[in-house]
């Protein structure tokens, strides 16, 4: 998973972003989504159902 400049657009401080958190939030959300998809694919390929995998991911997030 490479993060090329065309793939991720991080706004600099001159972009009227109030905090670094706001600037990084789109990247964080995108990466979180990609991780969830990979976890789901791995669990399903190992024989778990989609429902079981989703429940496990939700529980992992709750413990995080």
Image (tube, grey):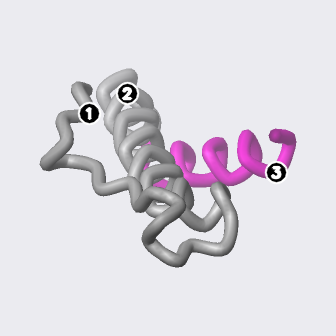
Residue at the spot 54% in from the left edge and 52% down from the top edge: 54
15 or 1, which lies in front?
15
> If you read the primary sequence from the N terminus, does the residue marked by circle 3 or circle 2 appear first?
2
Q: Position of residue 7 (x, y in %)?
A: 19, 47
> If you read the primary sequence from the N terminus, does the residue marked by circle 1 or circle 2 appear first?
1
Q: Quadrant of the C terminus?
A: top right
What range is drawn magenta here?
A: 49-64
Q: Quadrant of the N terminus?
A: top left
Residue at the spot 23% in from the left edge and 26% down from the top edge: 2
Q: Residue furthest left?
A: 6
Q: Nearer the viewer, mark 1 or mark 3?
A: 1
Give the secondary structure at mark 1.
Answer: loop
Q: Position of residue 10 (x, y in %)?
A: 39, 54
Residue at the spot 41% in from the left edge and 61% down from the top edge: 11
Q: Is residue 41 left or right of residue 51?
A: left
Give the secondary structure at mark 2.
Answer: helix
Q: Above or below — where is 15 with respect to 54? A: below
Give the secondary structure at mark 3.
Answer: helix
9 or 35, which lies in front?
9
In the picture of the structure, the residue carrying the numbered disc 3 is 62
* Residue 52: in magenta span: yes
Q: Above or below — where is 32 with respect to 4? A: below
What type of secondary structure mainly makes up the magenta span? Answer: helix
Q: Residue furthest top?
A: 46
- Characterize the local packing of mark 3: few (<14), some (14-19) or many (20 or more) Cα atoms within 10 angstroms: few
> If you read the primary sequence from the N terminus, does the residue marked by circle 1 or circle 3 appear first?
1
Circles 1 and 3: CB atoms closer than 8 Å: no
* Residue 28: in magenta span: no
Q: Nearer the viewer, mark 1 or mark 2?
A: 1
Q: Above or below — where is 8 with respect to 38? A: below
What numbered label is drawn on residue 42? 2
What numbered label is drawn on residue 3? 1
């Amino acid at each position: 998973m490479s993060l090329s400049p065309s793939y991720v657009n991080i706004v600099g401080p001159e972009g009227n972003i109030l905090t670094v958190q706001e600037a990084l939030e789109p990247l964080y959300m995108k990466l979180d989504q990609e991780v969830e998809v990979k976890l789901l694919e791995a669990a399903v390929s190992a024989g778990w159902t989609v429902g079981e995998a989703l429940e496990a991911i939700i529980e992992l997030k709750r413990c995080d």
